[in-house]
Amino acid sequence: MNFPIRCVLTLAYAWAAVACGAATASAADLSKVLGSVRLEAGQVADDVETVNGSVTIESAARAEKVETVNGSITVEDRAFVESAETVNGDVTIGAGSEVRGDVATVNGDVTLRSGVQVGGAVANVNGDMLLEGATVAKGIETVNADIRIGSGSRVSGGIRVEKNDGDGKWGRRERNPRLTVEEGAVVEGALRFEREVDLYLGPGVTLPPVQGIEPKRYTLQ
């Protein structure tokens, strides 16, 4: 089962749990069905979740799972979370923050600011990805995203661009996804391209071997 589908199933279960008022929620959890949720600066909580609304983790706060279904997630600077996952919404992780596990959305952009450390994978289906000097330990997965790996970023675990099966399930981008690796960025692990990709490389960038479809290569000026 690929990562985007796992994300959908996991959050569907989370939706059911929150909507039914799961008795397992602790007093330290922050959860809603309707409306946005905010963990204030410097505060500590367990799971922070909603179904229809955004989630904000303010600067220097700490939380475990951070989840929503229809809404964006914002983790401000120097915060810590165990994971950050949504279905329909963007995920933005602020400078110097740490995500011990995965960062994922199905329909939305992913932005990792300078100094962010992600201990798991980063994944989406539709929406773009931007790494501004961030570190990702277990790779990147997408179907339709443009991915920009900025200078000073490091991605271990490789990059996978999955095939769009054409049945309308994930939508379709008219042009090829674009993967840009800027000068001073490092990518370790295989590049697995299951569809055509336009690859833009900065001066001096070397990449691991490509598995699957050979990309169209361009040089950044």
Image: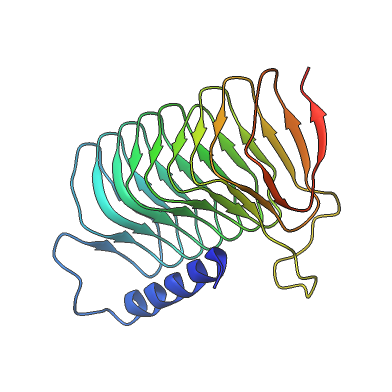
Is residue 184 positioned above or below 216 on the image? above
| Nearer-the-camera pick, 25 or 6 | 6
Instruction: Please give left or right for residue 99 compared with residue 159 in the image.
Output: left
Instruction: Please give left or right for residue 205 compared with residue 98 in the image.
Output: right
Q: Position of residue 142 (x, y in %)?
A: 63, 54
Is residue 93 positioned above or below 37 on the image? above
- Residue at the limit of the structure toward the bottom, as seen here: 20
Number of numbered discs visible in the structure rendering: 0
Query: Residue at the location (44% across, 70% down)?
Result: 11
Residue 17 falls in image quadrant? bottom left
Query: Residue at the location (35% across, 31% down)?
Result: 77
Q: Position of residue 13 (x, y in %)?
A: 40, 77
- Residue at the limit of the structure toward the left, as seen here: 27
| Nearer-the-camera pick, 170 or 101 | 101
Query: Residue at the location (32% across, 47% down)?
Result: 100
| Nearer-the-camera pick, 212 or 40 | 212
The image's colour scheme reads rainbow
Q: Position of residue 195 (x, y in %)?
A: 77, 56
Q: Quadrant of the N terminus?
A: bottom right
Q: Quadrant of the C terminus?
A: top right
Residue 74 falls in image quadrant? top left
Instruction: Please give left or right for residue 185 compared with residue 135 in the image.
Output: right
Q: Position of residue 14 (x, y in %)?
A: 38, 73
